[in-house]
Amino acid sequence: MRTRPDLHGTFGAVASTHWLASSAGMAVLERGGNAADAAVAAGFVLHVVEPHLNGPGGDLPAIVHVPGSEPRVLCGQGVTPAAATIAAHRDLGVDHVPGTGPLAAVVPGAVPAWLTLLRDLGTWTPADVLAFAIDLADRGHHVLPRVAATIAASADRFERDWPTSAAQWLADGVPEAWQRIRMPQLAATYRTLVDAGAGLGREAACDAALAAWSEGFVAEAIDRHSRIAVVDATGDAHPGLLRGEDMAAWRPTWEAPLALDWRGRRVLKCGAWTQGPALLAQLGILEPLLPTRADRFDADLVHLATEAAKLAFADRDAWFGDGADLSGLLDEPYLAARRALIGDTASLELRPGALRGEPRMPVVEVEGASRAAGAGEPTRGDTCHLDVVDRDGMVVSATPSGGWLQSSPTIDGLGFCLGTRAQMLWLEEGLTTSMAPGIRPRTTLSPSMALHDDGTVEAFGTPGGDQQDSWQLSMLLGMGVLGLDPQAAIDAPAWHTTHLVSSFDPRVWEPGGLHVESRLGADVIDDLRRRGHRVTDTGDWSLGRLSLASRAPDGSVRAAANARGEQGYAVVR
């Protein structure tokens, strides 16, 4: 079933998880901005309209293609504070990094990354790109039902423990869906960033805004805020470890992507500080097992994909982390050894490979047998995604996340909260993701790009935490095996495994867990259960929020966006 047409054009395209962000990005393209300008404008809009999914205090990985040069990864994943040691956490009486509160905060990287993208590759000023977000925050926008529901679910915590969040989100009671809400403190914060560069040239204005964020009024406010003990997901009050000096010492970086050739395209992902290489590993494990062409996602195909995902994510949990050496992960001898473990029935074991000798996994509990995080209150949000292409061939794939409104108390005077990405690190020695100062938590954020043999450049991605690289796999299989166009591949039935170590508090796993959309068909679902998969039928339209935008060498562009959730849209001309 197709929900929307496959959109084609010759000028530019923007696809994102919210129509207002897509509209802002396209407005920038129409007014002469390039893909970097459009992505930055859309990214700041997402902070306003999807505050339950991302915020200024969050994180940002992106992959950017500029014609005539190799694609590059922009790392906007901030690092842990200098004081963030395992011993420091033990001294505070915690045995795991909580899913909410300032103790889980790392250097907020999203805003510095957007400003770095604008400075290095854009043509507009901070004042130009921030105008859209400032207007929506100041005059107001109609709040999504999911935002209203998230605020309602967090209202007791806000009123009891986080008064600054109550002042921000409950000033007039719990908002109703589609009620118009304003975010005046956030608008003022953005205006102050703009004012820092007033009268300066474009690049200097970007640097001035960066300095105001990382060394100026934002860093000072975050330093004061982080020292205050507040109740977090442990049920106790803890201060944060993040300081202004941590923010001043860090800046976003550019680096090379990892890549794998698959069915006429070179798929690009961010490095070992993300889970992105797991998508490449899944493709590499699967390829010799896949049919050249198929008519549908049958039980054989879903079973193989699920078993490959289990192996790839087990390697993620054993080997990925900031600075980890993943050489050999995508070599055929290693892939063949992993592939040989796939049998006719579902595995119920965590089976990391011996990539660097004996694998070391964290101590983890089975789903249902673990502590309850946050006493049943929401401890995490989700993520956003956006893809942009312009008429000159610049392509951007970006997955902003973190700093969810339910993450941590709103910072008084700034109008946003800190992220909680450090919850992805372990207070256990000897792991690739053990807590340490100045490291990037191994994030789930996973933008993608594909360079096709015919010269087409394609950006794509999805929100979804641990599931991002499962849903992207199902879309790629839809295009590469079923022969679907991008919109039909996004609309096709999706699935994901929960047979992995959750990246979020509480850190548990569900042996054999497989979540599927009903539209796979009762015959397929029954067959998967017979093979030993512990299947959860999540309904017809429930999994994934994918989007995609691409540009071909002849200048034609196309874009597609997910209809699930009724808020993602693509715009093309």
Image (spheres, rainbow, N blue to C red):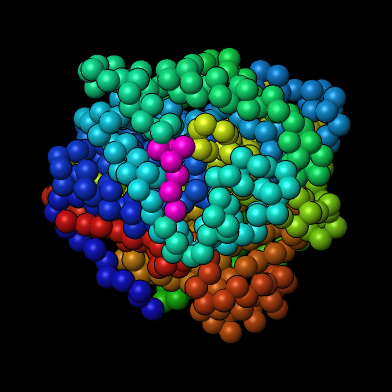
Give the quadrant of the N terminus: bottom left
Q: Please indicate, yes or no, whether residue 420 appears anywhere in the rendered image.
A: yes
Counting every numbered tag in the picture gives: 0
In reply to whether residue 182 is colored magenta, the answer given is yes
Magenta stretch bounds: 181-187
The residue located at (20%, 61%) in the rendering is: 8
Q: Position of residue 557 (x, y in %)?
A: 20, 54
**Does residue 375 appear left or right of residue 425 in this picture?**
right
- Pick the front one: 183 or 347: 183
Q: Return the x and y of residue 330 as percentages of the image width and height.
A: 53, 41
Residue 468 in the image: x percent, y percent? 53, 53
Question: What's the residue at 55%, 19% (across, down)?
Answer: 220
Please say if 359 is above or below 179.
above
Quarter location, residue 97: top right
Is 452 in front, or is 440?
A: 440
366 falls in the magenta region: no
Q: Is residue 342 left or right of residue 253?
A: right
Q: In which quarter of the image is residue 391?
A: top left
Instruction: Residue 130 in the image: state x and y as whole percent.
Output: 32, 36
Q: Which residue is drawn at 40% across and 62% down?
A: 567
- Quadrant into which the C terminus falls: bottom left
Query: Is 565 rendered above or below residue 416?
Result: below
Let me know if residue 335 appears in the view.
Answer: no
Judge whether 178 appears above or below 112 on screen. below
Q: Which of 199 and 211 is in front in this view?
A: 199
Q: Residue pushed farthest bottom?
A: 523
Question: From this viewpoint, which residue is outermost toward the front?
Answer: 172
User: Which residue is located at x 44 percent, y 53 percent?
Assistant: 181
